[in-house]
Amino acid sequence: MSLAYPLLLLFLPLPFLLRLILPSRQAQQGAALRVPFFTQISRLGGDGQVATSSPLKLILMSLIWSLLLIAAARPQWLGEPIEVPVEGRNLMLAVDVSGSMKEEDMVLDGNYRDRLSIVKNIAEQFIDKRVGDRVGLILFGTNAYIQAPLSFDRKTVNLLVEESQIGIAGEKTAIGDAIGLAVKRLREIDSKDKVLILLTDGENTAGSVDPIKAGKIAAEAGLKIYTIGIGADEAYRRTFFGMRQKYNPSAGLDEKTLKQIAADTGARYFRARSTKELEEIYHDIDKLEPVVGEGEVFRPVTELYYIPLVIAYLLTLVLAFAGLGLRTIKLDGV
């Protein structure tokens, strides 16, 4: 609750000050006017005066004055702050959720975690920072799906990222279909700032669209594609005899294709071998595609001035009818 013009309340004691400073009405009247029904009038006020200064009347008049000043000060109810996004980029995030993303070759908080868990953790931080951008989410495996259309609602997009599961779109990898779906969604948007961040740990093994061809179509549509290859270069696993065997968990990563797609669209390819590297990559993308600026925040205002105004009006009616009752004089012969 707040007042638009709180200084108006300084006028609250004005009537009382005027009452003290100005001469009374009785002193201003001078000689009395004699009327034929003086006797009846004297019964109302005593000593020939009409009772016009009763305590109840003063209280009502004080309340009316106070309510009118409060209404003029415009009491308002301020709602919760709402962020108004500024016009930014249209940014799609395409995340690989194929079966290979369950490989536990990267460390998060001191423990080895599957690749998708690492991606979720870093991607959510990245999305939080994209103030003013419309952000969308594509999940792809054997098939590609729009999980979240372009929206300023970053919290909802983050929630959908968190709820994504390995294998939800199939076990294989359709990189070309994911790019084609992003192009389809972004092509008709009248904006120069259209960006796709594609993150995968493998090669194109499914889908009907060739990734290189999809990249060229994206370039024609003005879409920049930053590609990220995720996965460690070496890890160890137990053999049948209990020995630790060194191997390359990212042997299936098609870096050549990812580099070509990024180059064709005027973007860059990044390699994330660890959680720290993936975090640094997102920082680099933030620098390459900076946000336009902080959005404005406003609080919706509900005007409440009519409440004291209506109460003052009702009290005025009460006062008027009360005064009329005092002045109703039953004269002899009338």
Image (cartoon, rainbow, N blue to C red):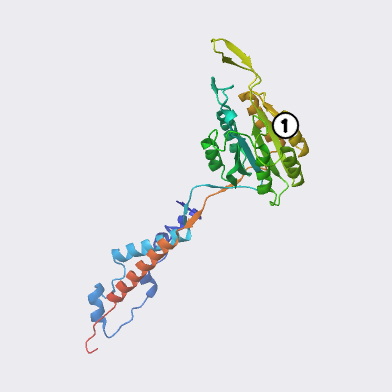
Q: Position of residue 329 (x, y in %)?
A: 26, 81
How many numbered discs, if any? 1
Q: Quadrant of residue 65?
A: bottom left
Quadrant for the C terminus in the image: bottom left
267 displayed left or right of 40: right
Q: Position of residue 167 (x, y in %)?
A: 55, 34
Q: Is residue 106 above or below residue 56?
A: above
Q: Position of residue 24 (x, y in %)?
A: 38, 68
Label 1 sits on a secondary structure element that is strand
Is residue 151 visible in the rendered structure shown here?
no
Q: Is residue 240 above or below residue 85?
A: above
Which of 132/299 is in front? Answer: 132
Q: Is residue 66 above or below residue 298?
A: below
- Residue at 56% over, 26% down: 114
Q: Quadrant of residue 53?
A: bottom left
Q: Quadrant of residue 228?
A: top right
121 displayed left or right of 309: right
- Residue at 31% over, 66% down: 57
- Residue at 61% over, 43% down: 136
Is residue 261 visible in the rendered structure shown here?
yes
Which of 8/90 is in front? Answer: 90
Give the labeled residue for mark 1: 269
256 displayed left or right of 298: right
18 displayed left or right of 133: left
Q: Position of residue 319 (x, y in %)?
A: 33, 70
In the image, what residue type sits under mark 1?
Answer: Tyr
